[in-house]
Amino acid sequence: MNLNWNLIFKLSLFGLAMALGTVYFIPSKLEPLCWLAIFIICAYLIAKNCSSKYFLHGFLVSLVNCVWITAAHILLFNTYISNHAQEAEMMKKMPMPDAPKLMMLMTGPIVGVMSGLILGLFAFIASKIVKKQAA
């Protein structure tokens, strides 16, 4: 497989930044706008720096992102939940309300796959628009 793992890892650092940012200071209402900007930047960089498998690169970036985010939200659960009252209420209504960390562990990969489909699509579309760097 001709994948740029270095680029995938580096782009996933946006996910690490968002993981910590959402724990400490990024409110839920601002998070989708941050992700949109990150997805556009990642799609552009994938299209600019890869020669094929654009969708797969985007998909894999989001899977690595979900590892960062899920881990940070579980490890820093008390801080995260104290800054996200709406999410705390939502968790009480979901299956396993007494095991919110387990619920995060189970839903994190699902969100990662869904966002991977979106970022993969963004990267594929960007590959049709962005001019490649000279080899």
Image: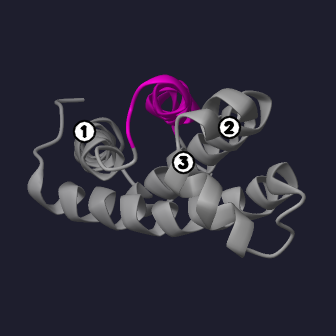
In the image, taking residue 98 as reference, residue 118 lies left or right, namely: left
How many C-alpha atoms fall within 10 Å of the one at disc 2: few (<14), some, or many (≥20)? many
Q: Which quarter of the figure has residue 133?
A: top left
Q: Which quarter of the figure has residue 89?
A: bottom right
Position of residue 98 measured from the top left corner of the image (x, y, whole percent): 89, 60
Vertical placement of residue 44 versus 11, above or below = below
Residue at mark 3: 85
N-terminal-most mark, 1 or 3: 1
Label ID, residue 73:
2
N-terminal-most mark, 2 or 1: 1
Label ID, residue 41:
1
Residue type, numbered disc 2:
His
Which of these two is toward me, 104 or 85?
85
- Taking the spot 68% from the left edge, 31% from the top edge, the residue there is 72
Vertical placement of residue 32 versus 69, above or below = below
- Tag 2 near tag 1, CB within 8 Å: no
User: From the viewer's perspective, is the residue at label 3 or at label 2 nearer?
Assistant: 3
In the image, taking residue 97 as reference, residue 55 lies left or right, namely: left
Quarter of the figure with the C terminus: top left
Residue type, numbered disc 1:
Ile
* Magenta stretch in the rendered image: 4-27
Position of residue 84 measured from the top left corner of the image (x, y, whole percent): 53, 43
How many C-alpha atoms fall within 10 Å of the one at disc 3: few (<14), some, or many (≥20)? few
How many C-alpha atoms fall within 10 Å of the one at disc 1: few (<14), some, or many (≥20)? some
> Between marks 3 and 2, how big is the CA–CA gap?
14 Å
- Taking the spot 41% from the left edge, 62% from the top edge, the residue there is 120
Label ID, residue 28:
none
Which secondary structure, mark 2?
Answer: helix
Residue type, numbered disc 3:
Ala
Which of these two is toward me, 127 or 27?
27
Which of these two is toward me, 120 or 97?
97
Please, what is the dominant secondary structure of the magenta stretch?
helix
